[in-house]
Amino acid sequence: MTAPWIAELAACLPNGAAASDPDVLASYSRDQAPLAPAGTPMALVRAKSVDDVVATLRFAHERRIPVVTRAAGTGLAGGANAVDGCIILLVSALDRILRIDEATRTAVVEPGVLNGVLAKAAAARGLYYAPDPASRDISTIGGNIATNAGGSCCLKYGVTGDHVAALEAVLADGTRIRTGALTEKNVAGLDLTRLLVGSEGTLAVIVGATVRLLRARHAPSTLVAFFSSMPNAAAAIAAMDATADLSLIEVMDHVTIEAVEALTHMSLDTNAAAMVLAQSDATDAAEVIARCQELCHAHDAIDVMCTDDAEEGRLLLAARRSALPALERLGTTLLDDIAVPKPAMPEMFERIQRTAERHQLVIGTFGHAGDGNLHPTIVFDASRPESKKAAFAAFDEIVRDALALEGTITGEHGVGSLKRGYLGEMVGEVERELMGRIKAAFDPRGILNPGKGI
Ligand SMILES: Cc1cc2nc3c(=O)[nH]c(=O)nc-3n(C[C@H](O)[C@H](O)[C@H](O)COP(=O)(O)OP(=O)(O)OC[C@H]3O[C@@H](n4cnc5c(N)ncnc54)[C@H](O)[C@@H]3O)c2cc1C
């Protein structure tokens, strides 16, 4: 069914930016969380300018039409999934790097710039854009900011929000706003920049960002270690984290090691219970990694390899980055994203193992051990209703176990539509209601990504 207002919307937008073909709409209805709910959109706007964003929001606000902002659609929580009757506002074509400034070490970008493109442009100027989600080559800076994306190097460099200096955004009624400042320090008023970071398209549409760049980092040294038990691996991780200047510590369990080896044939030790990757970019990186090697041996590592060669290090990290595609080859997957305080990680691994046994499911767990952020990935048979039911029961248990261990329902992927049912329990009902009032201040008619995030 075509919306009665589609011709009027098209008339507001020059250059044919609006579309309503059902096949085209369907292809923009979902992100990368296949099991998160998605509705049927009425229109797609491919914004080619900020004016297109303003015109779309004014139009939708007047008529109370929901708007789902979408960038690259790589989200893993259903955040960019359509809601019934919505306009999908695609901002990925706003993809110019407007300025890279060495003096302030900042870059001014449009929201559709891919993370990896910015990282390369910064590197060409001797600078470093730190936020490094595994999706960096396919996800946008705007999407990264809207989800406050994490990645591997958060242990040392923090999350996306730690690198955002200022934003330009459009409110639900089409009003343009600017937040933040170019300065290193800025304590003027409430921090609206930080409020927009991680707001998952529910408060405003981000149309420009000033992000911080760092000096180029030292060439990294890398360690990979295999352990016969997860508790030994966890003890080694804790020892390294406590004493070494590391930029990342990643972990994969036995199920994930086997799946990655089957995909990559990298000669990983498939008998091991855990594989740990650590990297240092300190000026004495080689010595730091050598000390970590000793710590791994002290915690009964079966095998430890180290390299100062950046390309070899990159290849070792590629093993970790292929964890999700490798597990996806085993069946339908339900990917979780929880984080627990670091000392609770061994207990969380044990609980995941018990959940897998209880529901007779394969669960491969990998994640950012340096941050306590784990991605238990439930593999199931989508053609069998009882298998799907067991997968969702396991997902629920894992989220509740994370809460029981004083962790969080989402470390980096966001609430989207997938985790909304847990938000009240996570933040508290009073606090959730406060979040609702903040949303109402930005978006009084509730048109921006309704039913997602907060
Ligand atoms: C293989 C793979 C690996 C991944 N690895 C990581 C990882 O390591 N760490 C991590 O954190 N995530 C990871 N992700 C998830 C995903 O890439 C991130 O959430 C990313 O930040 C989403 O960016 P996007 O451009 O695809 O945004 P989309 O998926 O299009 O949108 C995500 C959310 O942001 C909102 N949004 C997008 N752009 C704007 C804007 N300009 N203004 C307002 N709201 C906006 C949308 O409404 C939606 O709610 C991974 C995903 C895949 C597929």
Image: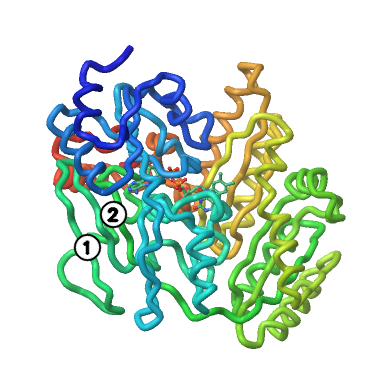
- Name the element at disc 1: strand
- Marks 1/2: CA–CA distance: 9 Å
Q: Residue at x 66, y 47 (%)?
A: 365
In the image, residue 236 above or below residue 447: below
The spot of residue 265 in percent (x, y) is 85, 50
Q: Position of 184 compared to 276: left or right?
A: left
Q: Position of 286 compared to 148: left or right?
A: right
Query: Which part of the image, by quadrant, shows the N terminus?
Result: top left
In the image, residue 229 above or below residue 382: below
Q: Label 2 CB, ligand 1: below 8 Å? A: yes
Instruction: Judge whether residue 360 can be spotted in this image.
Output: yes
Q: Residue at x 45, y 54 (%)?
A: 406
Q: Residue at x 38, y 34 (%)?
A: 421
Q: Nearer the viewer, residue 19 or 311?
A: 19
The spot of residue 292 in percent (x, y) is 72, 77
Query: Which part of the image, by quadrant, shows the C terminus?
Result: top left
The spot of residue 405 in percent (x, y) is 50, 52
Q: Nearer the viewer, residue 169 or 93?
A: 93
Q: Residue at x 14, y 46 (%)?
A: 441
Say few, some or many: other residues with alpha carbon within 10 Å of mark 1 (under 14 / 14 to 19 / 20 or more): some
- Name the element at disc 2: helix
Q: Nearer the viewer, residue 292 or 53?
A: 53
In the image, residue 48 above or below residue 273: above
Say few, some or many: other residues with alpha carbon within 10 Å of mark 2 (under 14 / 14 to 19 / 20 or more): many
Residue 43 occupies quadrant: top left
Q: Are marks 1 and 2 in contact (CB under 8 Å)?
A: yes
Residue 196's tag is 2
Which residue is identified by label 1?
A: 179
First-in-chain label (1 vs 2)? 1
Q: Position of 140 compared to 312: left or right?
A: left
Amino acid at circle 2: Leu
Amino acid at circle 1: Thr
